Amino acid sequence: MSRVKTAILVVLGLIWLAPIYLLVVNASKSVDGYDAKTVWKPAGFSLFANFGDAWSKAALGDTLVATTMYSVIAPVVAVLIGSAAGYAIVVLRLKRGFLWFVFIFGGTIFPLQMILMPLFSGYANSGLYDTRIGMIIVYTAISVPFSAFVMRNFFTGIARSVFEAAVVDGGGLFRIFRSIYLPMAGSALAAIFILQATFVWNDLLLGLTLSQSDSVRPIMPALTGLQSTYGGASLPTVLAGGLLVSLPTVILFLAAQRFFSRGLALGQF
Amino acid sequence: MSNQALDRTGARKAPLFGLPAVAVVALLLYLPFLWTTYVSFTDYDGLASPVWSGLANYKAMFSDPDLIGALVNTLLWVVGMVTLPVALGLLIAVLTYGHKWGTWLRLPFLLPYAISGVAVGVIWGFVLQPDGALGQALGFFGLPGAHTGWLQAGPGNTLMMIVAVTWQAAGVNALLFVVGLQSIPAEPLEAARLDGAEGFSLFRHHLWPQLRPITTVVIGLSIVGSLKTFDVVWVMTQGGPGTSSETLALSMYKETFVLNDYGQGAAIALFLSLVTFAASILYLRYQLGDAREQG
């Protein structure tokens, strides 16, 4: 029985790895040496030359810098805003706290399609369209509900006596938040950060709608641009681009697998 | 300080800490939501003022052939995503759970999940090229279909893209099912094994009933995810050829930002939201239920 199980898993696993094999092998072929009839056969190793091509042709350099900014700043700000809300609701016992929690968490129940058009119009009218700060603001807003959700649950697990002792010691409410509650929440903060950074990095729709120039446009819309402008002969370049933009999230994922499974159970993706 | 005094001090300052979250969410998520809702009942091109048009945009969704096509495709996505990746995820979870090398054998299925929808589209667009990787593999094994244009006609193109997303999503579902399996108490299972239950019968009578809650979550997530299908289709076919592989999420984008029919786009968005909301209730009941018990 166990042998049958293993056999099924190995065969299925190989099928699952085939597209990744094809991606790596063909992203490594030189643009001139690529032959559409023999995609399964490895030929040469020009991966880094192709990375370089994708980098310069799709202006991936600019967009990588911008996307890295978005994926770091927006989740950090969102985590702080979400923690503050969790602190207000659980520790400070905000009046009608559960209702406010539902209000904040409800912000991400509906699909992005519902907010795209007004965001586009609003951004166009206020000068935020196609600006880096505009992208950071929208990614932050999207990430706040989930942060608040996790932080509220996390703070619920901390004994009330911690707060009482801190107040008796004479700490202000802000200092108690900053130097007692935030440091205790390290693992939860990291989990939220990783999940939201991945979401921002992988976003296509918001980037497509709210930006256009090379220096603002996030990496996923830039990659789709590469795909439609080039193609045919320089497929290796497109594939190298696809591989390049996947590396950070794959590495992050392998390093922090358990955070992902936890986030999943919370219904994030 | 007494407990009550403590609560009073806290509660007085609490709004200050809660305000940023409430403000950001209200301004950037709820306000746009309300505007889209209003615009869905109007004729609006983004320039002139919206003109009230009642249910016209909603009627168009069910009479315009392109939009009906998108509706059917979206339905295909929902059906495809609650069957293929869920069944495969369950299979992988059951086969790897308790297996000596389970974690490693699960890895190939998890890898695609770490990749973005756009990259999945790029990879599978390449695999599915006419006479491309899939065609060559079929030819090599002497199987039919080597020269099929996988993405060149509906509904075949939608089905192949469902396969692509299955490739991405099966591992995640497996992970969720593993979490579900881990929560099943060990003793009754041991007892059943001692009674001679094994293989499929063990699964059907002892594991499956206990996996109900997690299955509900997986199916709820699959429905919600499939209704939003955009990235992979955008990259692989842009909804084409013609509109043959368009999903509602894609139609919404095209109606709004390509055709400047904001009202129509808004109606599609609201329709998607309502269906999504109904599906979300499936699994949110569990999440919010948990939250409420905790206080």
Image (spheres, rainbow, N blue to C red):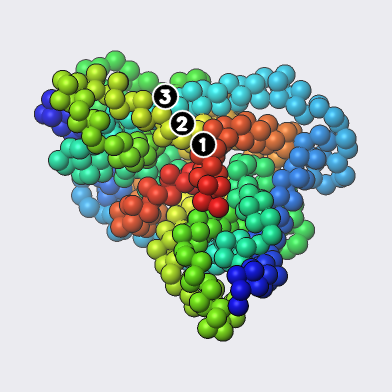
Marks 2/3: CA–CA distance: 13 Å
Nearer the camera: disc 3 or disc 1: 1
Q: In the picture shown, does residue A91 fall above or below B128? A: below
Badge 1: chain ID: B
* Circle nearer the N terminus (2, 3): 3
Q: Residue at x 51, y 51 (%)?
A: B294
Q: Residue A87, relative to residue B165: is it above or below?
A: below
Q: Which residue appears at 40% of the width and 63% of the height?
A: A187
Q: Is residue B100 left or right of residue A234?
A: left
Above or below B182: residue A208: below
Mark 2 lies on residue? B216
Identify residue for label 3.
B83
Label 2 sits on a secondary structure element that is helix
Q: In the displayed orientation, state which residue is furthest to the bottom.
A: A170
Residue B25 sits in which quadrant?
bottom right
Residue B213 visible to an observer of this rendering: yes
The first of marks 2 and 1 along the sequence is 2
The chain identifier of the residue carrying mark 2 reads B
Quadrant of the image occupied by residue B145:
top left
- Distance of label 2 from label 1 (alpha carbons): 6 Å
Question: Of the residues shown, which amino acid type is indicated by label 2?
Answer: Thr
Residue lying at 33% horizontally and 52% vertically, measured from the top left: A258
Task: Check if mark 2's residue and mark 1's residue have beta carbons within 8 Å.
Answer: yes
What residue lies at 26% left-to-right and 54% top-to-bottom? A46
Select label 2 or label 3 by which is in front: 2
Horizontal and vertical percent position of residue B240? 55, 29
Residue B32 in the image: state x and y as whole percent: 72, 49
Q: Of the numbered discs in the image, which one, if any, rests on residue B283?
A: 1
SS category of the residue bearing label 1: helix
